[in-house]
Image: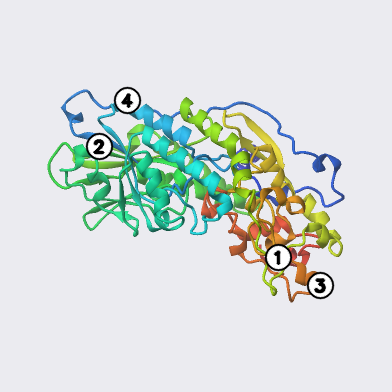
Amino acid sequence: MLLTTRYLIVSTVLGVLFSGCQLGCFQKEKRSEIQTVPAALEEKSVKVETTKTVAEAFTWQAWPQDESTKKRFMIFYTGNVQGYVSPCGCTAEPLGGIARFGALKKQADDVYGKDKVFFVDAGDLLFEKETDNLPADECQTKARHELLLSTYKSLGLTTTNMTSKDMSVRQPEWPKALLQKEAIPYLYNPKLKEPLGLLKTIDVLKDEKLPIIISATAKDAIPLPPKQEDGMLHFYTSLQSQYATVIELNLNGEGQLKLDDRESKRQARIKALTKKIATYTKAITAGDARAAIYLKKVTKAQEEIKALKKPEALGPEPAPPWARFHAIPLKRGMPEDEQIAKNLKAYEDSIPTLVSQCEENIVCPEPKADEARYVGMQTCYACHQEAVKFWKNALVEVEGTHQDGTKFKRKSGHAKAWQTLVDDNKEKDRTCIGCHSVGFNKPGGYCKTSDVMDFENVQCESCHGPGSKHVAAGGGNRFIQKEVPETTCRGCHEVPHIPSYESFVYEDRLRSILGPGHGLAKLKSLAESE
């Protein structure tokens, strides 16, 4: 009985861990055998349809129909959207997207009334990086920004807080023109934090005392829990709006506004228990002598999680006035607003034409005399045949979810990085191809989507740097980066291309991409350190 129970718990937890593995994530237990590349894996990756699931429904809880709703409001807020309108698709469960956000916002409008539901943006609305100013990107970027702002306007955006990034990447005229076109008011606060200004732009709240700071400094998909500090209530955003973040206000009552953080504390406890379960399960699967003890701890933690999920676990509601935080993951399979989804598809279908227009007269800059050029994997193969063969086989089967909730499986890995774009019709999307090819927009690389040719996939030079000088020198380590630091990997393995910052474990990833001809000694040293 103990063995059976142990097997069920271990297999269940491992199933959860593997189902959360993002495209491009490697697990050593499922890596392909190191041999000549099987013909089936050299072909177009196959999507295997399984069951269709619908994301767990989120339902807005209606307020009592009495005087208590007189001064009760829902404030949707975003920040660090960075121009994103749809999930990148790099994870097994891509979050976010304006169509899902729009449907959720309109559902709240229907439940509470448009006079009770408002929408503000805290900053970094348009750009992800300070370098998003290349002429070749302009056509696609402008179309995406127009779609984003017109959608936000249709959802009732009251105001946005323009930051230094929004105003400087393409000069102030760019965002100002777009905002004026949609008649969206804006504040200018380069420090990202606006204690009172955002909510004061909402007419019904302009005379209220609201010591609320909405901070657009997100670095992860999951927003930080709110906190009350020095008389101020701090609320945080979700990176690229992968979660819908909402402040529920009940201003009926006297006294200082307080934070109702019962739900945040409950979620924090559930997260801590889930982490413990994963740790105990790992010890059990490793054959730890204390497996029976850990099994009991797993069962106890699961029982506590079950109890915490019951409504009564929250305890009594505090007396108003209070502010409450809601964070809803925008998952695939959730309802989408039909018109917004239609507009989004029209934009995505137009990307190849838009990109072609702006790339037409672009000339890629030549590298400086002392800069190396990218030579491509075929050149590397001449001397590193064993490493390239291993690279082609470093594949795993990962699960994912289509927009409609349908599950699929496909082979994934550095050698299949370009194919994932082709499968998702994104091989012309300039916001994607940099992490699915080598040398894009880099000195000595390529700068037009039509010139990808031998640079498809995450190749040797993606990690080790351009190799022309290395080749000219006849090999050696002088002109190549032999040891690859974690920062290089995180240039692409970052949110939203991974579920969270902590989901990328550098040593675990190394174990999956090292092998014969490619860091075998390093792999052995990692194994010895376990």
The residue beneath circle 3 is 472
Instruction: Tell me the quadrant of the picture where the C terminus can be found.
Output: bottom right
Q: Secondary structure at mark 2?
A: loop
Q: Earlier in the sequence, mark 4 or mark 2?
A: 4
| Disc 3 to disc 2, C-alpha distance | 71 Å
The residue beneath circle 4 is 111
Residue 337 - label: none
| Disc 4 to disc 1, C-alpha distance | 54 Å
Left or right: 238 as drawn, with respect to 110: right
Q: Earlier in the sequence, mark 1 or mark 3?
A: 1
Locate residue 349, reporting x and y percent.
60, 34
Q: Earlier in the sequence, mark 4 or mark 1?
A: 4
| Disc 4 to disc 3, C-alpha distance | 68 Å
Q: Earlier in the sequence, mark 2 or mark 1?
A: 2
Front label number (4 vs 2): 4
**Number of residues whose C-alpha sits closer than 10 Å to that of mark 2, classed few (under 14), some (14–19) or many (20 or more):** few
Scheme of colours in the image: rainbow
Locate residue 140, reporting x and y percent.
55, 44
- Vertically, is 270 above or below 508? above
- Which amino acid type corresponds to the residue marked 1 in the rendered image? His
- Which amino acid type corresponds to the residue marked 4 in the rendered image? Val
Q: Secondary structure at mark 4?
A: helix
Q: Secondary structure at mark 3?
A: helix
Residue 444 image-quadrant placement? bottom right
Locate residue 262, reporting x and y percent.
31, 43
Which residue lies at the image location 23% right of the left edge and 50% below the top edge? 196
Q: Nearest the camera: 489 or 473?
A: 473
In contact (CB < 8 Å): disc 3 and disc 2:
no
Q: Is residue 293 visible?
A: no
Residue 317 - label: 2
The residue beneath circle 1 is 464
